[in-house]
Image (cartoon, helix red, strand yellow):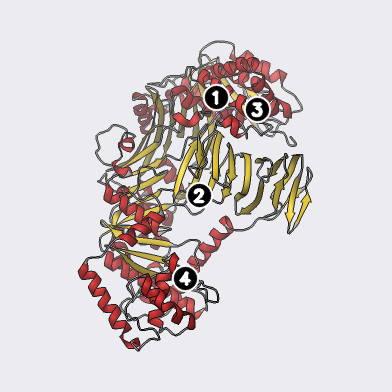
Amino acid sequence: MKLDSLDDAIAAVRDDEAPAAVAETAAARVRQRLAPHASPDAVPALAIHGCADVMALLPAYRRGELKAARAWLVEDHLGECAACRAALREPGGRRLAILPWHPASPQAKPEARRFGGYAVAASVLLAVGLSAWGVRQTFFAVPLGSRASVQSVSGALHRLDGGRALPLAPGEEVGEGDAVRTARGSRAVLRLRDGSSVEMSERAELKVTARGKDTTIHLDRGSIIVEAAKRRTGHLLVAASDCTVSVTGTVFSVNRGIKGSRVSVLEGQVRVARGGDETVLAGGDQWTTSDAVGEVPLRDEIAWSGDVDRHLALLAEWKTLRQKWSAVEMPGVRYESPLLSVMPEDTVAFASLPNYGESLAQAHRLFEERLQQSQVLREWWRKVDPARHGAPSLADVIERIRSFSDFLGDEVVFAAVDEDHLRHVVPILVAEVRRPGLQEFIEEKLASADPQEDRPEVRILEDDAVPGPSAKKAGVFVLLRPGLVAVATDEKALRALDARREGAGAGLDRTPFGQRIQEAYAGGVGLLFAADLERMTTAMAEHDGRRDRRQQQALHRSGLDGLRYLVLERKVVADESQTQAVLAFSGARRGIASWLAAPAPMGALDFVSPHAQGAAAFVFKGPALVFDDFVGLISTNDPRTRDELARLESKLDLSLREDLAATLGGEFALALDGPLLPTPALKLVVEVYDPARLQASLELLVTRTNDEAASARRPGLRLEAEQVGDETYHSLRGDMPFELHYAFAGGYLVAAPSRALVMKAIRTYESGESLGRSATFRSLFPPDRDAHVSGLLYQHVGPTVLSLLRVPGATQLTGDQRRSFEALTQGARPTLVSIYGEEDGIRVAGTGGALNLDGASLALPLLLERAMGGLPRPANP
């Protein structure tokens, strides 16, 4: 039976009947323990079979005449029986504060061992304490300052102070936890610290609190519309009594009523958490906490808002624009590069991208056309146009890019040239020139530039002698030759490039690094990046031209001295984004690089549900071997490491290698498989070869930590265990941000912040309906010769729209006035990156993208946003 909530799980456990033999054995133990208290009671009932027996005992219970054992049985029954509790609450009767029943948990009793002291336990406790303090400061500290300011009020807005209602006017501040309420027929708009706006309907009441980088709107009643600002860190939450909404950079409404809550998404995406479940809503979606609260058209839901028409009309305009942009033609893949032969042989990094100038111009023309046709879009653009703040207009920036790119060929190459063992690296930009007039174009732009502008001097190199040093603080040199343009900050590097163009000296294509780049072109490339790691690591091991022996030993121990090349490729084939990266070694992988095992079967994902938002899973070589490599690596820099490790193990009275590392297999997975807030629903699944030995080691570590905590008069940790059916569930509690629960199942340790999550993981494993067995998940793997992988990274946290017009209130916009307001991101698919540990390298391959709707919509928004990101921002907007 599928259990969808913690209540269902508890009910299932309660209804599970033990076999008769087990029940009789347990009853015998209870009788034996109660035997010492078997003196006559004030009431003749000797056995408790049901409510009648309990009610017969209530008079004696009220008078306090029952023995402890029988009183416990009565209280246990009262905890579950409402009728008997009502009988207990008769006039004059004693009221019992019924508490949830928890069985006693057996204390861990590790085998007694000798040990020398508690210094290590102090270190463990200190690490736990510092970690908890850091987490608390980051996530739970209360920031200073106000929480919101009043932007506008139509009618009346009050701050509730005890029994008083104090009026609030525009410009006034709302503090931490201040309750504010709108009056009948009133509306108000609050501006939060992060720039988000909250529009309140009539009779709405809310409070705003902040913890760490998170801001929470506590909605007690009424309806609000939230226009969430983009945030780099933290979350904006709306907490009603029956659900919690988590968002960033979107527009949605929450209506909290006496029958339940209703969440409606106008733009973007939100996550709604209720109990242990989480629901993802996209634009146009609606969700309620109760069947008594029905769904309504979005227009009706936000009809009270003064911005309803703006929301609806702008959503429709963005849907139209997206459809038009999907028709923009993008550059195809390239199978060779004539620029390799002119690039310096000392190039350590090489990046190639197609000429996007015409695609950018096409997209902008479509935007301008729609801008002329839509008054709603024009009004919005007037607010966000960068020219409004004194910056160059979008049209000017795009026209400059397009006009310059018209002279260039299909490819633009950026390279980093090593002039002196990485102590002097020269960046160079090179492109083919496909039509004449580029020099005149550059000279015209230079002549029209503002002479007062503080910028580097741009000099076009001529064939004659080089002029003396420029008076300006920096220089940019441009080399123009038939069919070629090159730009660099070093004139000497450009002169050398010119000589190679004429056949003097070897180019990058003659080097092993250049030949590896040519191999990438043979398969077709869109975006390409390559780095000569062998040259870089060699330079790292040198100091003032001499080999640094200790640094060289550390590199050898880590295996990094075996690195050769890094090559990353991305292209769009048949409207599908494909990404591949190869980390190549000069021989067999060693050290850290060898920790990743060869592709092998994975079972950890069988504990992760198909609805997980993200997961990472890997297969490593034996943890004991990884431990040996790690100790050897740090011993290279500090020879005392092994002696300190021996003292540590002596104090702990266990072997870190044998009692911990050797008990584990080489597979683990970490997944976000449920709500992110208030406590992330993270699952850790680790392969275990010897559960009993691992559990004993964990118990011993907790004991040593508690010994040290007791000596310092600080609270310790509680490691408890409880048998539920055939499973033993362990819990670790104490001064930590959250509890840790775990169980051993199917040869794995499954850990999570709550027992309900652990139980859900085990049920997923037993049902066989897991992420690892999902057909949708498997369809994301790129086709290749391997049936298995060494690792993978999976995400389905919802689509993220990257667009040119990325501003608060106008991101991820889509919609339709007549019905569902379908979000731009609804067509997005999850992404998967596969990792393969090969004999002499590590290969990474991925298919899909967060905007994988088609080839144009995949690449174009990113490029347009980068163009916008390059615009200078005014100091005082």
Between the C-alphas of marks 2 and 1, the distance is: 66 Å
Circle 3 crowding by C-alpha within 10 Å: few under 14, some 14–19, many from 20:
some
Q: Earlier in the sequence, mark 2 or mark 1?
A: 2
Q: Earlier in the sequence, mark 4 or mark 2?
A: 4
| 2 or 3: mark nearer the eye | 3
Between the C-alphas of marks 2 and 3, the distance is: 65 Å
Between the C-alphas of marks 4 and 2, the distance is: 89 Å
Q: Earlier in the sequence, mark 2 or mark 3?
A: 3
At label 4, which amino acid type do we have?
Ala
Circle 4 crowding by C-alpha within 10 Å: few under 14, some 14–19, many from 20:
few
User: Do callouts 4 and 2 mark residues in contact (Cβ within 8 Å)?
Assistant: no
Q: Earlier in the sequence, mark 1 or mark 4?
A: 4
Q: Nearer the viewer, residue 627 or 209?
A: 209
Q: Which mark is residue 87?
A: 4
Q: Which residue carries the number 2 mark? A: 544
User: Do callouts 1 and 4 mark residues in contact (Cβ within 8 Å)?
Assistant: no
Between the C-alphas of marks 4 and 3, the distance is: 60 Å
Residue 824 in the image, given as x and y percentages of width and height: 51, 28
